Amino acid sequence: METTAACPRILIIYTGGTIGMIEDPETGTLRPFDFSHLIDNVPKIKMLNYNIEHIQFDPPIDSSNINPSHWQQIASEIGKRYNDFDGFVVLHGTDTMAYTASALSFMLENLHKPVIITGSQLPIGEVRTDGEENLITALQIAAAIDPVNGEPMVQEVAILFENYLWRGNRSTKMSADNFNAFKSNNFPSLAKIGLSIHYHPDALWRVREKRRLKVHKGLSTDIIIIYVYPGMTETALRQQLDTPGVKGIILKTYGAGNAPTANWFNEAIKEAVDKGIVIMNVTQCVNGSVHQKRYYTGSLLDEAGVISGHDITTEAALTKMMFLFGTGLTPRQVARCLSHSLCGEMSL
Ligand code: ASP
């Protein structure tokens, strides 16, 4: 059960994405368009009787162009206007939505208001668009309050898409075609959207102590992802490990965190760790967790000093490392923080 505050104040941050795109008449490709086009296509919004303000990226972008400077922009806006609004809705392309949701979850420390990210698979101007419903539901979730204590129902960064509300830093884009495009493969949904919005209280994030929101804007881009595959050569691995300036690596391994046991592989990994590069083991499987000590093929990574990513998503692992190095921590401190869940991104 949830209720809505009288005339809730919601800030929409429109970054772009399919939801607000129109077709280029010359090329037939979809390109982001401005917010007035988007909102004109959702006249029903007035029926909500909310106090809605908006800001937009200038120009709005396809989310394939997202980079950490955009996350800094979104986090700064939320920080600046945190006390003026009850909730925030971020309209965003689906391609990198899970990265943005993960990054914001780390950047907005002590968040206890809803930051709901949504978008759509079909542009808002199309007859069968999923954008209208997603936008309206996202606004309702951003405005929802717990009738028991009057607090915001959602107090974290979440992705609303079609029938589900997911924790942002647990989500992954699963489909380029389906309206239910997102999923959190290792964590239950925060809410199921049907005739009503059915929240799952046990899954919702709650901070024990309420502290002032702290916006972290520093993000390091000296992090890379290395994908292990059969046939990987020593040259290919070493070239990636030797990337100039690299501080952190997400090692995408097989199954429960396994990798080849060839001497050249383990020596290269160990040399990188000994140089002070932080390496985190994240499974290529969409579901399940790394258990580095289960197989011999994982135990060598453990012995080399690779940190288990447990059941973290690649999106959350990457942005967590960007965030931790961005705060100025030493590699040893980063390594220690990676083993802890900061805002519900891993099950330990
Ligand atoms: N390419 C688009 C974007 O990420 C896809 C979408 O929004 O669904 O901006």
Image: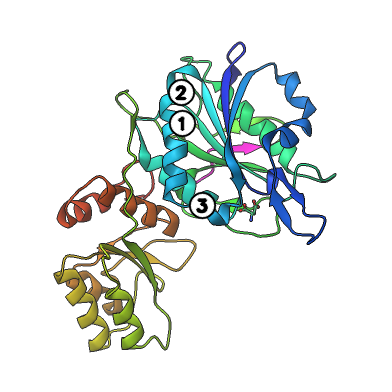
Q: Secondary structure at mark 1?
A: helix
Front-lying residue, 246 or 181: 246
Question: Left or right of 302: which side holds 82?
Answer: right
Q: Secondary structure at mark 3?
A: loop
Question: Left or right of 242: which side holds 206?
Answer: right
Say the numbered circle drawn on residue 119: none
Residue 189 position within the rendered picture, expressed as x and y whole percent measured from the top left: 54, 43
Question: Left or right of 168: which side holds 14?
Answer: right
Front-lying residue, 165 or 272: 272
Marks 2 and 1 sit apart, C-alpha to C-alpha, by 6 Å
Residue 247 position within the rendered picture, expressed as x and y whole percent measured from the top left: 25, 62
Instruction: Provide the residue span drawn in magenta.
Output: 188-193
| Kind of residue at disc 1 | Glu
Local packing at callout 2 (Cα closer than 10 Å; few below 14, some 14-19, many 20+) is few
Q: Are marks 3 and 2 in contact (CB under 8 Å)?
A: no
Residue 27, picture quadrant: bottom right
Residue occupying image coordinates x 28% and y 68%: 292
Residue occupying image coordinates x 64% and y 59%: 175
Q: Are marks 2 and 1 in contact (CB under 8 Å)?
A: yes
Say the numbered circle drawn on residue 81: 2
Residue 332, picture quadrant: bottom left
Q: Which residue is mark 1?
A: 77
For residue 129, above or below residue 108: below
Residue occupying image coordinates x 58% and y 14%: 5
Say the numbered circle drawn on residue 66: 3
| Residue 190 covered by magenta stretch | yes
